[in-house]
Image (cartoon, rainbow, N blue to C red):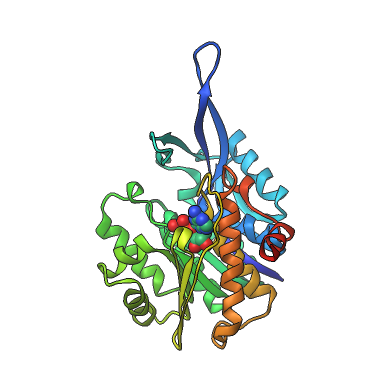
Amino acid sequence: MLDLVSLGELLIDFTPVGISEHNNPIFERNPGGGPANMLCAASKLGLTTGFIGQVGDDAFGHALRRTLQENKIDTANLLLSKQYKTTLAFVHLDEAGDRSFSFYRKNGADTMLRFDDVDLEMLERTRCFFFSSVLLSEGDSRETSYRLAEYAREQGALTVFDPNLRENLWENLDDAKACIQKALHLADIVKVSEEELYFLTDHAGLLDGGRMLLERYGLKALLITMGAAGCCAVLPEYSLTVPGFDVKAVDTTAAGDSFTGGFLYKLLAGGYDIDRIEKRELLPILRFANAVGALTTTKKGSIHALPDGEEVLTFLRR
Ligand code: ADP
């Protein structure tokens, strides 16, 4: 049995970190992809995990597979494509240090994942299935994502969706909205940022918009992350806001992903049923998730910045 299986994009990003003595730019190479970050966070905390995705049968793809394996993730469903190359992304840093991306992903291996190539047995033995919208934006992976989410649900897994909207991956935002709405119908728990909530509810306000999404799509829980301010959860019977922690943030990359990883770790390891969870049980879970997100912002990078369980507990005890 696995606790958590994540479907997602998997790529290498190149971030400029300086200039060499011969005047050549130096790039740092990092594994990228929200669902993989989320899964690494959950795995590092102690869940048993598996990844579904595709990379090229090339040096980048092999490096990515090693990274997942080093994080104790089952990679039996990480396919190595002979036909397509691993997706690459180049990071631009503006003067404030904010990141934007140029993607090299037309026919990138991750976006060309076919449903028939996935070994469904992994979904028959997982308690929870996570997916996001990046694989919905192009290629065979759009249909594959919907079908895998449907299958996981039929098998009784809890389904979790993070829109993780990357606007520049979409030809137009109407298409993005329609695809995300279709995914929301397949989800039990959804995690959105405030910006995504406003995008999906036409600026209906935080709690009103949250409740609107919950009811419209029949969700069991909606989690809204609010950066340093913490998070808010909306459930059918109640809502709950939990303030964030005061830390010295140096890089917010992967904070949202690790928040979700921390949330799912506490929920699944604690054996809670999201249909019946009480407010007093949910509070420490959200506080834990906030701590995981906050700690991730105190280090540079994504997977390398994720805390382990000991670090989170020490932080919560301070
Ligand atoms: P995303 O927009 O990717 O969903 P956020 O930036 O809202 O992610 O961060 C997710 C979570 O990480 C927040 O809910 C919060 O708990 C924590 N977090 C993020 N930024 C900070 C920060 N600057 N200080 C403290 N906690 C933070």
Residue 23: image location, x then y, percent: 49, 13
Residue 141: image location, x then y, percent: 45, 55
Residue 194: image location, x then y, percent: 37, 63
In the depicted view, which residue is nearer to us: 248 or 189? 248
Q: Quadrant of the N terminus?
A: bottom right
> In the visual, does 298 lie left or right of 99?
right
In the depicted view, which residue is nearer to us: 68 or 258? 258
> In the visual, does 156 lie left or right of 69?
left
- State how many labels appear: 0
22 to 262, vertically: above or below? above
110 to 28, vertically: above or below? below
Q: Residue 114: in sight, yes or no?
A: no
Residue at 53% across, 10% down: 22
In the depicted view, which residue is nearer to us: 181 or 205? 205
Q: Quadrant of residue 203?
A: bottom left
Residue at 39% across, 79% down: 214
Residue 265: image location, x then y, percent: 64, 68
> In the visual, does 45 lie left or right of 290?
right
Q: Residue 181: in sight, yes or no?
A: yes
Q: Quadrant of the C terminus?
A: bottom right
Q: Quadrant of residue 280?
A: bottom right
- Residue placed farthest to the right in the image? 310
286 to 227, vertically: above or below? below
In the depicted view, which residue is nearer to us: 100 or 295? 295
Residue at 38% across, 56% down: 165
